Image (cartoon, rainbow, N blue to C red):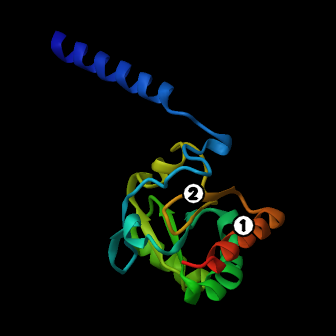
Amino acid sequence: MKKLIILAAVAMITCISFSQDQKVYEHGFLVKVGDTAPDFTIREAGGESYSLSDLRGKVVMLQFTASWCSVCRKEMPFIEDEIWLPGKDKGLVVIGIDRDEPESRVLKFRDDMKITYPLSLDPGAAIFGFFAQKEAGVTRNVIINREGEIIFLTRLFERREFDGMKKVIFAELAKKQ
């Protein structure tokens, strides 16, 4: 029993010191513009699995979302109509990453929202945890250039910021490869 208590205490101290060493940026982000995006493997709801690194050479938009998020629901039609549809044939990949919901709910959410970009699964918010503190909220976007570098971050849905994000995405898509 004593060994178990000692091991638990060591594990707690290790976790505390790790979290104190981890830099937290505005809006609970754990990454910033200029960072290389953390690599992860994702599985689309009802679809295939791949790694973020497999998408090098494309501009990637990660949209962290959830079916229960009203702000996400407000933003998604704008992503579909103003970013995904005009950008998908120009080298853009948009991936909605649904925070910790079962596949059946994610598929229904996609259908309810009438979006054509993929929604993927994020059990336990593991992927979310690479980009933001787990207790931070969804409705955030991460824009990644062809080299895998983060070039824009958003939190919540604000029209002016959304338009700025669009400019960054389409300027990046316009660059010669």
Give the residue at mark 1.
Answer: 165
Where residue 150 is drawn, which disc sits there?
Answer: 2
Residue 1 seen by the camera:
no
Side of 89 where 10 appears, left or right: left
The amino acid on which the numbered mark 1 sits, given as a three-letter code, is Met
Q: Residue furthest front?
A: 176
Residue under the image location 72 percent in, 66 percent down: 165
Q: Nearer the viewer, residue 144 or 112?
A: 144
Residue 57's spot in the image, x, y percent? Answer: 47, 74
- Quick check: marks 2 and 1 in contact, CB under 8 Å? no
Q: How far apart in space, not on screen, are marks 2 and 1 (Cα)?
A: 12 Å
Q: Nearer the viewer, residue 24 or 114?
A: 24
Side of 108 where 33 appears, left or right: right
- Can you say whether 84 is above or below 128 in the image? below
The image quadrant where one finds the N terminus is: top left
- Can you say whether 47 is above or below 105 in the image? below
Residue under the image location 42 percent in, 72 percent down: 55
Determine the image quadrant of residue 25: top right
Secondary structure found at label 1:
helix
Residue 99's spot in the image, x, y percent? Answer: 49, 59
Q: Nearer the viewer, mark 2 or mark 1?
A: 2
Residue under the image location 18 percent in, 9 percent down: 2
Residue 132's spot in the image, x, y percent? Answer: 54, 47
Residue 154's spot in the image, x, y percent? Answer: 68, 57
Label 2 or label 1, whichever comes before in sequence order: 2
The amino acid on which the numbered mark 2 sits, given as a three-letter code, is Ile
Secondary structure found at label 2:
strand
Q: Nearer the viewer, residue 17 or 66?
A: 17
- Can you say whether 59 is above or below 142 in the image? below
The image quadrant where one finds the C terminus is: bottom right
- Can you say whether 161 is above or below 88 in the image? above
